[in-house]
Image: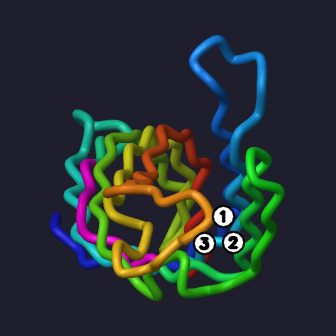
Amino acid sequence: MISPTVGINFLPVRIATTNAAKTARLENFDFDLLQIPVGLRLSKPLGNSDFDVQLHGGVTLNLPRNINYTNHLVDIATTDAALLRPQTLGFYGGVGLSRSLGAHRSVGLMLNYQRTNNLLNLDYKDTATNHPRAALAFQSLSIQLIFKVF
């Protein structure tokens, strides 16, 4: 069975860059990421059991919020929201197993991968560091426990 899926995720993102020897911290990016994933889920019964194998995938709308950036080299800190794009698109996919607990109820375990490129606003002018063509990508691998209650 194929079904549409929509969700809301909230992720506190904390990124630190270091020098090549990893002895000095260069930058910190701290922001909250609100995600709205929209996709499709394919469920297939596993034999005559109460278990289903599930595959899912789709796109994610990413909305960064509450930005704090610190450059330790030139001692600059900013909360300028223009540093990141106001919205970006990414993709996600996953595989999992769910078990029916009765009418319209189930519990499942999913392994998910997601990726978003180009979180940085390339039009942002950082005159302190003169970053040419800086890029910030976000990717994650996660395990989710999912409860379906209605």
Secondary structure category for the residue under label 1 = strand
Residue receiving disc 3: 33
Magenta-span inclusion, residue 146? no
Q: Please give left or right for residue 149 compared with residue 116 in the image.
A: right
| SS assignment at label 3 | strand
> In the image shown, does 99 or 135 lie closer to the viewer?
135
Residue 142 circle label: none
Q: Are marks 3 and 2 in contact (CB under 8 Å)?
A: yes
Q: Quadrant of the N terminus?
A: bottom left
Q: Which residue is mark 2?
A: 32
Q: Nearer the viewer, residue 43 or 14?
A: 14
Is residue 5 found left or right of 146 in the rendered image? left
Q: CA distance from mark 3 to mark 2?
A: 4 Å
Q: Position of residue 63 (x, y in %)?
A: 51, 82
| Amino acid type at mark 3 | Leu
Please give the residue where the numbered disc 1 appears in the rendered image.
11
Secondary element under disc 2, as helix, strand or loop, is strand
11 left or right, relative to 60:
right
At label 2, counting other C-alpha atoms closer than 10 Å, the crowd grade (few under 14, some 14-19, many 20 or more) is some
Q: Amino acid at mark 2?
A: Asp
Pointer 2 and pointer 1: residues touching (CB < 8 Å)?
yes
Q: Position of residue 120 (x, y in %)?
A: 44, 68
Question: Which x, y percent locates residue 100?
Answer: 48, 54
**Mark 3 vs 1: CB contact within 8 A:** yes
Residue with the most extreme top position: 21
Is residue 66 visible from the viewing direction of this image?
yes
Considering only order in the chain, which callout, 1 or 3, is on the residue closer to the N terminus? 1
